[in-house]
Image (tube, rainbow, N blue to C red):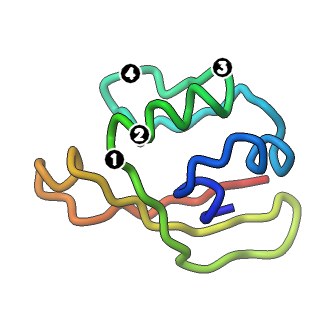
């Protein structure tokens, strides 16, 4: 999932999680954080030069993936990285 996101592989991510909508309020905090599709989400990620890295996972319902988010807009306000949890 992380490699699909960082590589902006729309087809692979869509096959993994569906085509949307995607809710990601921490990507662009000055917006609603709602994206109608994976492609729109990836366009926003490109604008922010956003990268994710793995920080662990949790089994169960739902499956949880713990990640670190890094991008220039976060760094500009003094946030080196942001921890978040993705639930599937």
Mark 1 vs 2: CB contact within 8 A: yes
Local packing at callout 4 (Cα closer than 10 Å; few below 14, some 14-19, many 20+) is few
Q: Kindly report the distance in space between the C-alpha atoms of the residues bearing marks 4 and 3.
A: 13 Å
The residue tagged 2 is 46
Identity of the residue drawn at 21% across and 50% down: 72
Q: Kindly report the distance in space between the C-alpha atoms of the residues bearing marks 1 and 2.
A: 5 Å
Local packing at callout 2 (Cα closer than 10 Å; few below 14, some 14-19, many 20+) is some
Q: Kindly report the distance in space between the C-alpha atoms of the residues bearing marks 4 and 1.
A: 16 Å
On screen, residue 64 versus residue 40, left or right, reads right
Q: Position of residue 81 (x, y in %)?
A: 30, 64
The residue tagged 1 is 49
Mark 2 vs 4: CB contact within 8 A: no
Q: Kindly report the distance in space between the C-alpha atoms of the residues bearing marks 3 and 1.
A: 20 Å
Of label 3 and label 2, which has the lower sequence position? 3
Of 56 and 60, the residue lying toward us: 56
Under circle 1, the secondary element is loop
Q: Which mark is residue 31?
A: 4
Under circle 4, the secondary element is loop
Q: Position of residue 53 (x, y in %)?
A: 49, 70
The residue tagged 3 is 36
Identity of the residue drawn at 48% across and 62% down: 52
Of label 2 and label 4, which has the lower sequence position? 4
Under circle 2, the secondary element is helix
Q: Nearer the viewer, mark 4 or mark 1?
A: 1
Q: Which mark is residue 39?
A: none
Determine which quarter of the picture holds residue 65. Answer: bottom right
């Amino acid at each position: 999932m992380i490699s699909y996101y960082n590589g902006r592989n729309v087809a692979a991510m869509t096959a993994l999680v569906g085509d949307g909508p995607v809710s990601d309020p921490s990507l662009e905090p000055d917006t609603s954080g709602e994206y109608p599709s994976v492609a729109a989400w990836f366009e926003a990620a490109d604008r922010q030069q956003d990268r994710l890295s793995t920080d662990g996972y949790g089994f169960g319902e739902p499956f949880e993936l713990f990640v670190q988010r890094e991008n220039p807009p976060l760094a500009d306000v003094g946030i080196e990285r942001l921890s978040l949890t993705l639930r599937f």
